[in-house]
């Protein structure tokens, strides 16, 4: 394990068993914990987390893609403390300085006329307003999102989220339709040059350089949905530039641009959800939409923007925002002095520490190393994908059959859940915390704090290799 110059003080709180008992008695049972034996985390430092026994873990999931700069980051902690000494809360009815300075600094990072913002405490709230705003502004009602997408588990975004694990028996999202997901590994179409990534699907195709037949086919599916299920005019279309919770699924190049054209032809607004992809995580750009060659009408963001402090925003054009002026709109905590002070210090630290650049360099190295691992286990590691420090590794059943005519070199049957769970548990035991996701729960999600190094990657790869070897059936 790479060196760490920090040792936490001994843990003195309630035991893990006590916490689990309280959890069982006093928290909602639907709140899942990771791992067979959960880890009680009580302290963090940069890319490291410490449990109650003092054991150190390399954090490759960053509190679900949220701790962007690193745990207990010095400058952001100082900004929070400094602001806490002065003023915690006023609401936006008084023009305290932080919200104004932050609004300017944040929107300065946006292209085109995306110049006005509204702050919240969670991504779900930002997406909720995005749906509402698209309807108020266009006068239309129907909204489209992509299957396998995640946009929040509450309010209207619950309806945008299109994964069965987040669905209950009650209907959500009236007027929301889910288009076929352009997944070039698992979907019907895809090939070996579809992705904006160093790692492509192991799948043959006949596309000439610069062409992508898969992106046309998936765009046709969107057109088909609009032909059959929506009125001639729609309110909006939501997409994550790279799907996060769904298992780091990347659209084929050109798809989002084609989708945006189709949506705008029908009067709809294009909304990109940058809750996971924003703030430089994808390495080449600050915002995920920039690598798709589009400027959206509305952008939503959260998670990494506060390095773990509850902070979210919606950014749009003055014209679209003005549609909401016909009645009062307000949130109590959005844009609080504390949140804005943290948000400003996060932006500043991202520049000073060149985190986007690090995402590109270390992320590309990580992808190359994972591609090497895939060559070692070609029938079990079905797909390696992503960009920057937003990476997914889809595990498949090495003993499953390969669909004829699919052009794939492995089965897409998910790895048996027990083997997946064993690999995951072993990585944790060896000191590596990975995320997990995808509709079948068979994708390792790797989205660490943006300060990780190549040495961290080398350690993670050796742990991952060992865990796979320990878990696969003896053949
Ligand atoms: C892409 C995306 N959008 C929206 C959300 C919802 O954000 P929050 O959990 O802050 O409400 C999430 C959360 O995981 C997300 O990944």
Image: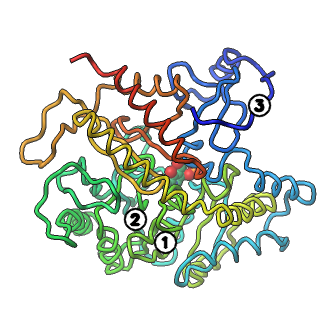
Q: Nearer the viewer, residue 355 or 314?
A: 355
Label 2: which residue?
A: 143
**Mark 3 — residue?**
8
Along the viewing direction, whichever of 14 and 204 lies nearer the viewer: 204
Q: Position of residue 352 (x, y in %)?
A: 68, 65
Distance from Cα at disc 2 to Cα at disc 3: 48 Å
Q: Quick check: is the Cβ at mark 3 less than 8 Å away from ligand 1? A: no
Secondary structure of the residue carrying numbered label 2: strand
- Residue 54, placed above or below residue 305: above
- Indicate the secondary structure of the residue bearing disc 1: helix
Considering only order in the chain, which callout, 1 or 2, is on the residue closer to the N terminus?
1
Asked if one can make out residue 293 in the rendered structure from this viewpoint, the answer is yes
- Where's the N terminus, which quadrant? top right
Q: Nearer the viewer, residue 171 or 398?
A: 398
Q: Identify residue for label 1.
A: 134
Residue 464 screen position, x and y as percent: 42, 32
Task: Categorize mark 3 by other alpha carbons within 10 Å: few (<14), some (14-19), many (20+).
Answer: some
View extreme (left): residue = 405
């Amino acid at each position: 394990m790479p060196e760490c110059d920090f040792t936490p003080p001994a843990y003195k709180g309630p035991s893990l068993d006590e916490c689990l008992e309280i959890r069982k008695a006093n928290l909602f049972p639907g709140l899942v914990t990771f791992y067979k034996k959960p880890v009680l985390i009580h302290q963090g430092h940069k890319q490291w987390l410490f449990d109650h026994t003092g054991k150190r873990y390399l954090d490759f999931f960053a509190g679900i893609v949220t701790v962007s700069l690193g745990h207990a980051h010095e400058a952001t902690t100082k900004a929070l403390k400094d602001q806490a000494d002065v003023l915690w809360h006023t609401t936006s009815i008084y023009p305290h300085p932080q919200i104004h300075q932050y609004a300017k600094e944040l929107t300065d990072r946006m292209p085109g006329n995306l110049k006005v913002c509204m702050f919240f405490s969670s991504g779900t709230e930002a997406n909720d307003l995005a749906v509402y705003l698209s309807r108020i502004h266009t006068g239309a009602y129907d909204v489209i999102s992509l299957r396998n997408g995640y946009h929040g588990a509450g309010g209207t975004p619950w309806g945008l989220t299109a994964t069965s694990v987040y669905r209950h028996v009650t209907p959500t999202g009236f007027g929301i339709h889910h288009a076929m997901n352009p997944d070039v590994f698992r979907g019907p179409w895809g090939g070996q040059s579809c992705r904006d990534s160093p790692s492509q699907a192991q799948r043959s195709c006949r596309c000439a350089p610069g062409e992508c037949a898969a992106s046309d086919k998936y765009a046709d599916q969107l057109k088909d949905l609009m032909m059959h299920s929506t009125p001639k005019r729609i309110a909006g279309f939501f997409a994550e530039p790279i799907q996060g919770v769904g298992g780091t699924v990347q659209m084929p190049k050109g798809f989002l641009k084609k989708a945006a054209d189709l949506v705008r032809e029908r009067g709809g607004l294009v909304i990109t959800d940058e809750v996971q992809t924003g703030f430089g995580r994808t390495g080449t750009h600050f915002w995920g939409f920039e690598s798709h060659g589009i400027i959206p009408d509305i952008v939503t963001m959260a998670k990494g923007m506060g390095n773990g402090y509850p902070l979210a925003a919606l950014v749009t054009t003055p014209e679209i925002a003005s549609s909401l002026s016909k009645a009062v709109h307000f949130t109590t905590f959005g844009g609080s002095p504390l949140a804005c002070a943290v948000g400003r210090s996060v932006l500043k630290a991202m520049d000073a520490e060149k985190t986007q650049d690090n995402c590109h360099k270390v992320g590309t190295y990580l992808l190359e190393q994972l591609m090497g691992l895939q060559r070692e286990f070609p029938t079990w590691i079905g797909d390696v994908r992503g960009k920057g420090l937003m990476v997914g590794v889809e595990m498949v059943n090495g003993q499953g059959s390969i669909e004829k005519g699919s052009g794939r070199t492995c089965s897409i049957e998910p790895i048996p859940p027990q083997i997946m769970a064993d690999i995951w548990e072993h990585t944790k035991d060896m000191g590596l915390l990975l995320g997990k996701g995808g509709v079948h729960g068979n994708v390792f999600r790797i989205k660490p704090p943006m300060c990780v190094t190549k040495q961290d990657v080398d350690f993670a790869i050796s742990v991952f290799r060992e865990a796979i070897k320990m878990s696969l059936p003896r053949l």
